[in-house]
Amino acid sequence: MYSCTVFTIRGSLSFRGFVGFKFRTAADYFSLENVLVLDQMFSSIDPYLNTDAGTMSPFEHGEVFVLDDGGEVDLDLGNYERFLDLKLTRDNNITTGKIYQSVINKERKGDYLGKTVQVVPHITDAIQEWIERVAMIPVDGLEGPADVCVIELGGTIGDIESMPFIEALGQFSYRVGPGNFCLVHVSLVPVLSVVGEQKTKPTQHSVRGLRGLGLTPNILACRSAKVLDDNVKQKLSQFCHVPVANIVTLHDVSNIWHIPLLLRDQKAHVAILKTLDLQSVAREPMLEEWTERAQIFDTLQNPVRIAMVGKYTGLSDSYLSVLKALLHASVACRRKLVVDWVASTDLEETTAIEAPEAYEKAWGLLRGAHGVLVPGGFGDRGVQGKILAAKYARENNVPYLGICLGMQIAVIEFARSVMNLTEANSTEFEPDTKTPCVIFMPEGSKTHMGATMRLGSRRTYFTTADCKSAKLYGNVNHVDERHRHRYEVNPDMVSQFERAGLQFVGRDETGKRMEIIELPSHPFFVGVQFHPEFKSRPAKPSVLFLGLVAAASKQLDTVLPNANGNHVANHITRQLSANGCAPLQNGHAKKIISNGVANGNGKYLMNGNGNGVHN
């Protein structure tokens, strides 16, 4: 999938990492976030005609990432938010649909004064205007515009849908001029498995096509399974007209946190700063945190097995944020994460008849897991399997975390098994159910799908202080988490559930919308209506995921705060301090903020991705 991301930076350029180089290995999905400095802003452009990612199936495009303001965006924005700890907005996500819609709206209002509206110049101008407008909006909590804008343009050179964006950026580079624009072209250098030869032809053709479209790369970032040989770099330099010093190898590594170190060692930051004429304000990369985390990850040996029970298990990107949140928590708990993918349909009785081997395998994975996680989703396919997974976890004291639909099915299961309400169901799956314990929200729309859910950051108030969730959050009285749902627990049945032993420990500001459930008698059985995975960060794991992993690895008592109310971040600090690693500051990434650069000229770093390299 072709995409373009925009990212701006301000302040003295003290590199802590690198942003924008994105690729996939057999082991992991990498989005190298943390480029040039400290005060940043970021946007993403995708050339699909959808105005946002909200109506696309996870099988089609991976997960839908939700922002604080309710924007439903591409998962790439989630990657950047996680690594940079920013809060982006819906305007940071630009799609072809949004651009064309804005241009058509202007045409309808007569803004073009009767001119024939065309791709060039009207669409290309709109793209440039949107980039420049969004680049001026800070998302890092500081005031004033940034100094450097990083634009990540992905896909395959020659894609028809990418042409307006490439043309727009070609015009843009000409307009801002040399010294204000740096193009980093990301390309695949495949390795022939039989002889081990690294082939440069794909990159040569990609660069030739790119130059033909008006963009000349300053730096080549070469994706490969192994380090590029010197003679391969010389060949690429000769045929692509790029200095050898500006050719960077992006080879497979053991974990994602090695990537900033890899780029630093190859002096990628020096090449970028030289092209943008910013050497006078640069300082050495600050990568101690990345080094610590990479070392910790490589030394993990004791496994923690989490059964991920869902309907989109055929594509791991469908649950990318959930996987990253689990990874962040497992590193904090010093455990090697093992995710067992369990297709919820395989747990159902129909599968036992039609595919007994798949049925036995699914149940074997579930029974062998240390913890169970049921993520969000829509539709009735596989729901019965999720209910069975929740029942298994509840009856066998296996740590359980249900997110959104995962919370709703836990409520349904409790109603059926504990309260003997055998017909309990959600009106999403059975509109005429006689026991609707999950219902459609009154303010929702049943005729329009896009942007009609309860979306974005909403406040949850704890109604019970003596509960695991409140303790994990640090004994605060409320939390702000991101939502994406159309259905909710029926408020008319809450009192029945609580009399039966199910606690609703978190509610919205009205007290009528249920946000968090717990079973007090269970070691760890938590369900949340919101999506905590969207706010998990490498140095600040989501506390609910941390609770699940800690409970699954018999460490929950050490993770929960003590009587003095110390927050779970202290535990994270202790974990990262182990084995000689320097501790982080209060469990957060160290950040150095300097005075802004006295430079009135905008600087633009563009990173293109060609030859079908996945985004």
Image: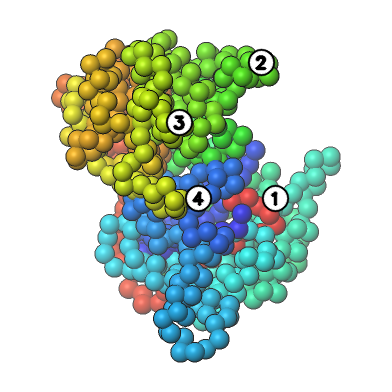
Closer to viewer: mark 4 or mark 2:
2
Closer to viewer: mark 1 or mark 2:
2
Residue at 60 percent across and 74 percent down: it is 167
Tally the marks.
Answer: 4
In this image, 81 relative to 337: left or right? left
Cα gap from disc 3 to disc 2, whole angstroms:
24 Å
Residue at 17 percent across and 25 percent down: it is 465
Q: Residue furthest right?
A: 195
Tell me the crowding category of disc 3: few under 14, some 14 to 19, or many 20 or more residues within 10 angstroms, Cα based: some
Closer to viewer: mark 4 or mark 1:
4
Query: Of marks 1 and 2, which one's residue comes earlier in the chain?
Result: 1
For the residue marked with disc 3, what is the amino acid?
A: Glu
Q: Residue furthest left?
A: 564
Q: Label 2 belongs to which residue?
A: 353
Q: Label 1 belongs to which residue?
A: 228
Residue 289, located in which quarter of the rendered image? top left
Q: Which mark is residue 430?
A: 3
For the residue marked with disc 4, what is the amino acid?
A: Thr
Q: Are marks 3 and 4 in contact (CB under 8 Å)?
A: no
Instruction: Name the secondary structure under disc 3.
Output: loop
Closer to viewer: mark 3 or mark 4:
3
Cα gap from disc 3 to disc 4, whole angstroms:
22 Å
Query: Of marks 4 and 1, which one's residue comes earlier in the chain?
Result: 4
Residue at 55 percent across and 54 percent down: it is 21
Q: Which mark is residue 55?
A: 4
Q: Are marks 3 and 1 in contact (CB under 8 Å)?
A: no
Tell me the crowding category of disc 4: few under 14, some 14 to 19, or many 20 or more residues within 10 angstroms, Cα based: few
Instruction: Name the secondary structure under disc 4.
Output: loop
Tell me the crowding category of disc 2: few under 14, some 14 to 19, or many 20 or more residues within 10 angstroms, Cα based: few
